[in-house]
Each structure stands twice: as structure tokens, then as C-alpha cells.
Image: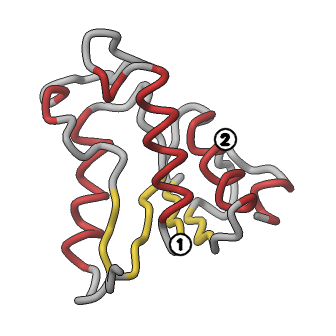
Amino acid sequence: MRNDFIVYLAGPISGCSYDGCTDWREYVMRALPDGITGLSPMRSKQYLIGETTVADQYDAKVLSTQRGIFARDSWDCRRCDAILVNLLGAEKVSIGTVMEIAWAHAFNKPVVLVMEEEDNLHEHSMLREA
């Protein structure tokens, strides 16, 4: 039986730089108090260091194939206790992040959504309600 409260760290990946995908997640993980663990979809993907534009998938890396991404991210959303979604500064709609929000709803997980009050590409009644 695990003791930590797990927070899945959702947000755009495809089209972002590696640093853009990981910097905020690492910041959050460092800031979380003892007993709360941040779970990043970018964990174990150091092979992407230096990427200026992370692709949708990488067939040569099992964790970054479409099946690998879908299976692990959906499992992470199922096993976590809450989901923190960071959409600040999103430059394009993140379909994967929207799926993670939908999974959170389906799995009865609370969602904390962070985005600009106006002019975010994800501004939509479905996300505001989630």
C-alpha cells in the first residue's frame, strides 16, 4: 500500500521544447511538500533532452510510441489522486492534455486547471467545467 498522494502533472508536450515540457514539472515536484509526489509524463524520457520541438511520437522509443504514450498516460491518470493541468502559454491546443482531463473526469479524479483568464487556446466550456 502506498503512502504518498500522487499528483499527475498534465500539460502540452507535442510541439514544445524538452525544457518547456520539463522545467515547470520539475519546479512543481521540488515545491510539493513531503507526502505528495508529482508524476510527470516526461519521466524516463531524457533521450529527448535538446529537442527544440518534441514530436507527437517517436517509434524507436517504446515510451514514446503512440501505444506507449497512451497506455502509460492513461494508467497514470487512473492511479493518481489528482491532476494538475498547466495550460499557461500554450501555443497550440494540446489534444493529449484534453484527453487526460477527460480521463480524470471518468476516473473521478479532481482536476486543478491553470491557464490564463482570457485568450488561452483551450478556453472552452468543457474545460472550464472540468
The quadrant in which the C terminus is found is bottom right
**Mark 1: which amino acid?**
Ala
Density class for disc 1 (Cα within 10 Å; few <14, some 14-19, many ≥20) is many
Q: Position of residue 19 (x, y in %)?
A: 22, 41
Q: Give the alpha-carbon distance from disc 2 to disc 1, as whole Å.
A: 23 Å
**Mark 2: which amino acid?**
Leu
Q: Which residue is mark 2?
A: 121
Q: Position of residue 113 (x, y in %)?
A: 60, 65
Q: Secondary structure at mark 2?
A: loop
Q: Position of residue 8 (x, y in %)?
A: 44, 62
Q: Position of residue 119 (x, y in %)?
A: 68, 49
Res 57 label: none
Q: Residue at x 60, y 49 (%)?
A: 100
Q: Secondary structure at mark 1?
A: strand
Q: Residue at x 50, y 66 (%)?
A: 84
20 is higher (above) or lower (below) than 128? above
Q: Is residue 130 left or right of residue 125?
A: left
90 is higher (above) or lower (below) than 49? below
Density class for disc 2 (Cα within 10 Å; few <14, some 14-19, many ≥20) is some
Contact (CB < 8 A) between labels 2 and 1? no
Residue at the extreme top of the image, as rendered: 60
The quadrant in which the N terminus is found is bottom left
Q: Is residue 65 left or right of residue 70?
A: left
Q: Which residue is mark 1?
A: 82
113 is higher (above) or lower (below) than 102? below
